[in-house]
Amino acid sequence: MVWNMPNWYIDRETLKRSLRVNGSEHDAAIDRLIEAASRDIERLTKRHYIPKTQTRLYRYPGRWSQGDVLWLDEDLISVTTLQTKAQDSSPTTISSSDYFLEPANDAPPYTRIEIDISSTASFESGDTSQRSISVAGSWGFSNDTDSVGTVSSGLDSSATATSFVCSNGSISNGITVGDTLLIESEQLFVEQKTSAALGSILLNGAVEASKSANLTVDGGTHGISDGEIIKVNSEEMLVRSSTSTVLSVERAYNGTTLAAHSNDDAVHIFRTLTVSRGINGTTAAVHADSTAISAYRAPGPIRQAVAAMAIAGFTQESSGYGRTLGTGDAAANVTGRDLDSLVERVVGEFSRPREYAI
């Protein structure tokens, strides 16, 4: 399992579209800026927005625990196992019916665990007060996900495979670089997305090197979604809309070169994912074909703030950290109070209350 995997709160393709950047020349810089902005928003709000599976230990009694209450130094989504006298040879497991996750009316995330005083359960130190309460569970601000497709192939026979094919490569509602995925109980981080010829999707007729927006493909169920990127030879195209035989596309997408193509040229689809397996405390496992894939989504304002911070970093680097980018009529201001105002508002809304924050 991978513990220190960087979770991103905005994906590469979304940021590139906002920056109007094509090609892969700036990918490394964009990835670095997304990573930095994601860590900054965690530091500023003292929260993590993609859950981790983890066991956390607490002294009893101690800074975080007194009597029947355990205050938590990290947001809690759910508990798998709660134990007291955790360092003893025979720890005591407290039943889920004997404690409450609080606050009850506005959570998760939860900030404390309270023993039900009508039960016989209690927190105890045991042989030592150190690390005497153990909380195993899912930790983070939320576990909100979107459904983004299914596994097509590549994960059904190996828990160590680092690439697989998904059913949906759409950049609008599918999977992109920087996503943290959930397949059954395993989390995976998408490092790269590449194209491959899937099935027998071929051009039905030659295509000229013009800005013609329609491609005809062989009839049948091609399974290409609106918003997917396809590739014919070396030219990439963005699918704007589709029928069973006609794809309406944006030609020469992502900095590729407009070109002519021949009848029966293969249509490649960007659905092969290179991933890190078993991240955030989860365990890599075998997954059958057609297993559902979800992608974690941070709250909208968090995504907006991370995007704005990364965009500001990109434009400032491009300007040599000057106040403007470009010259003359094309000059643009790359500093200002709008970013500060946005970040201040988001931090004010999402910061963990001071009494709970570490």
Image (tube, rainbow, N blue to C red):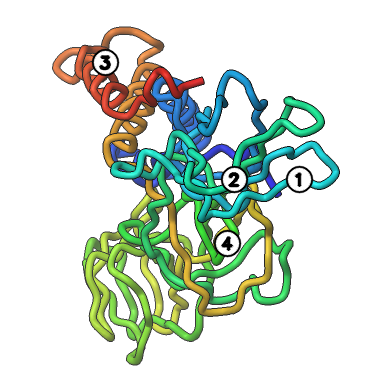
- Of marks 4 and 3, the one in the foreground: 4
Q: Residue 91 carries which label?
A: 1
Residue drawn at the location 68% of the way across and 57% of the way down: 283
Question: Residue 180: x percent and y percent?
Answer: 50, 50
Judging by the rendered image, the residue that carries numbered circle 4 is 185
In the current view of this chain or complex, which residue is farthest to the left? Answer: 329
Give the number of the disc on residue 340.
3
Q: Can residue 300 be seen in this view?
A: yes
Q: What residue type is labelled 2?
A: Ala
Mark 2 vs mark 3, foreground winner is 2
Label 3 vs 1, first from the N-terminus: 1
Q: Where is residue 22 in the image (x, y as percent from the top left)?
A: 37, 43
Mark toward the start of the polypeptide (4 vs 3) = 4
What distance separates the C-alpha of mark 1 from that of mark 4?
26 Å
Residue 197 sits above or below residue 83 on the image: below
Q: Which mark is residue 121?
A: 2
Tell me which numbered mark, 1 or 4, is placed earlier along the sequence: 1
Give the SS element for disc 3.
helix
Mark nearest the camera among 2 and 1 is 2
Q: Between tags 4 and 2, which lies in front? A: 2
Q: Distance between the residues labelled 3 and 1?
A: 49 Å
> Amino acid under label 4?
Ser
Residue at 20% in and 18% down: 338
Residue found 68% across the figure and 60% down from its top:
284
Which comes sooner in the sequence, label 2 or label 1?
1
Q: Earlier in the sequence, mark 4 or mark 2?
A: 2
Whole-percent x and y of residue 194?
53, 59
Residue nearest the observer in this picture, 320 or 261:
320
